[in-house]
Image (tube, grey):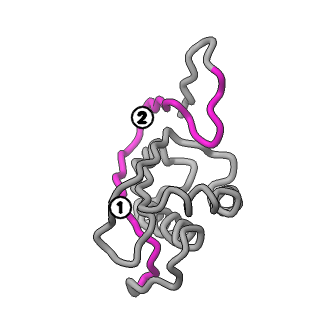
């Protein structure tokens, strides 16, 4: 996997502008919310839901033999921009604990609502797992 940064561009913080992958098996992880394996939300706050959603993404990816380092693209959907911005330091700690210094191409989208209530954030990912 190669991070793509056009010449002269300032490096992004916390994500990559693009990622190139030469070969492997593509894995698409559907949107994961912040509930546990029993589909129960343990918190209504953004940071704990982000942590659980990311753990859920990684659990699905592990079923395909992949790990955090194989994630090429991630999209986050959140219904509460002020709460997300306030939670960024805690979310950053969670990211480093679960993903290390791996930063895929990412998008953050704020939406009106999510299907699963009281969900505040949902993560989906695309990974390329080596053959």
User: What x and y, as percent, mark residue 78?
Assistant: 44, 59
Q: CA distance from mark 2 to mark 1?
A: 24 Å
- Outermost residue, left direction? 115
Q: How dense is the environment of label 1, judged by Cα within 10 Å: few (below 14), some, or many (20 and up)?
A: some
| Of 105 and 128, the residue lying toward us | 105
- For the question of whether residue 17 can be seen, the reply is yes
Q: Which residues are magenta?
A: 10-37
For disc 1, the marked residue is 31
100 lies above or below 16: below
> First in sequence: mark 2 or mark 1?
2
Along the line of sight, the residue nearer the viewer: 10 or 68: 10
**Residue at x-position 56% and y-position 35%:** 16
Tag 2 residue:
23
Q: Nearer the viewer, residue 50 or 4?
A: 50
Mark 2 or mark 1, whichever is nearer to me: 1
123 lies left or right of 47: left
Seen as rendered, the residue at the extreme top is 8
- Location of the C terminus by quadrant is top left
Label at residue 55? none
Q: Quadrant of residue 46?
A: bottom right
Residue 32 counted in the magenta span: yes
- x 41%, y 48%: residue: 109
The secondary structure type at the circle numbered 1 is strand
| Image position of 25 (left or right of 59) | left
Viewer-side residue, 20 vs 116: 116
Please say if 1 is above or below 74.
above
Q: Is residue 129 visible?
A: no
| SS class, disc 2 | loop
Q: Residue at x 44, y 30 (%)?
A: 22
CB within 8 Å, label 2 to label 1: no
Residue 83 in the image, given as x and y percentages of width and height: 56, 63
Position of residue 4 measured from the top left corner of the image (x, y, whole percent): 54, 25
């Amino acid at each position: 996997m190669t991070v793509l940064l056009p010449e002269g561009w300032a490096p992004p913080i916390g994500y990559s502008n693009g990622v190139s992958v030469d070969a492997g098996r593509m894995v698409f992880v559907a949107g994961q919310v912040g509930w546990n394996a029993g589909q129960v939300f343990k918190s209504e706050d953004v940071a704990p839901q982000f942590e659980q959603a990311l753990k859920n993404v990684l659990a699905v990816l592990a079923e395909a033999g992949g790990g955090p380092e194989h994630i090429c693209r991630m999209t986050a959907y959140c219904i509460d921009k002020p709460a997300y911005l306030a939670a960024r330091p805690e979310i950053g700690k969670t990211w480093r604990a679960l993903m290390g210094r791996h930063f895929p191409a990412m998008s953050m989208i704020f939406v009106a609502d999510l299907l699963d209530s009281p969900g505040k954030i949902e993560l989906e990912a695309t990974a390329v797992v080596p053959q």
